[in-house]
Image (cartoon, rainbow, N blue to C red):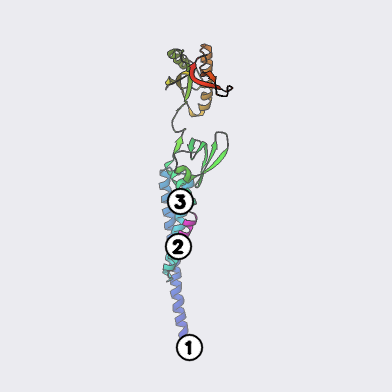
Amino acid sequence: MNFNQIIPVVLGLLTQFGLKLIGAISIWFIGQNLIDFGLKLLRRAFRTQHIEPTLVNYLLNIVAVTLRIILIVAILGFFGVETTSFAALLAALGIAIGAAWSGLLANFAAGTFLMIFRPFKAGDLISAAGVTGTVAEIGLFTTTINTLDNVMTIVANNKIFSDNIENFSANPYRRVDLKAQIHHSVNHNEAIRLLKQRISQIPHVLNNPAPDVEILDFNLAGTVLAVRPYCHNEDYWQVYFDTNKAIKETFGEAGYPVPEQRYAFSGNSEDGNTPLISSTYFQK
């Protein structure tokens, strides 16, 4: 084959390659525009659902990378490159990464659901995964909680999502649960009346619903009252302490006897030294 015969073959190959190159470039630009357009529609759909912006950006990045990989594989196939083995390699790589990062992916999935379903938000007081405190940040893999004693605690999202979640900030108010022990000789109706009157005067205690003071239980010392004022979440501990103080002061001012349990000694043990305690109960 002489030079004059080679030139047409080379020109034909170059022309064919050039056309394929132009076609590949066209496919790339068209594919990129379609991907960008689809991502804009997807972002708009996420915004209408009020999904966390951090999660939206992360999901859009994953979708964008996945679509661009598919576009590259399609272009390689356009050039005649065998893509079956390439696709199998990507699948195997995805399985390997998934197995190695199973814990991280579980936390990511849990973080995604936390941001979508929003059982709590930053600033809420919650109890989850054995931790009680104020939510500082909800991340894709972990949630940061400042505990009641002001310790920053980072909890894995999967641990939170797989456990019960108590959100103390979800409702407009909450109840303070306390007990008040009174002597068996005290008129319980009078004690209830005095406590209700005193507790209703405590700052930040709500009038609607009104504080509950009722008989809860009985023991050897006398009657046990349930004392339950209601307040807003941010006032909980102050109302808790003020209510305890009100119980003490109310019963003291009323002159109620102090409830106590005492047992009488009944003889000595066989060695003559150790006193035996009988079950006889008497009051002070």
The residue to which callout 2 is attached is 92
Rendered residue at 43%/31% (across/down): 171
Rendered residue at 43%/57% (across/down): 35
Mark number, residue 59: 3
How many badges with numbers are in the image?
3
Rendered residue at 54%/19% (across/down): 267
Q: Is residue 29 visible?
A: no
Residue 124 percent coordinates (x, y) = 49, 35
> Which of label 3 and label 1 is nearer to you?
3
Q: Indicate the amino acid at tag 3.
A: Leu
The residue to which callout 1 is attached is 2
Circle 2 residues within 10 Å: few <14, some 14–19, many ≥20: few
Dominant SS type (magenta) = helix
- The image quarter in which residue 80 lies: bottom left
Q: Indicate the amino acid at tag 2.
A: Ala
Q: For the residues labelled 1 and 2, say whether their Cβ atoms are less than 8 Å apart.
A: no
Q: Indicate the amino acid at tag 1.
A: Asn
Magenta span? 91-101
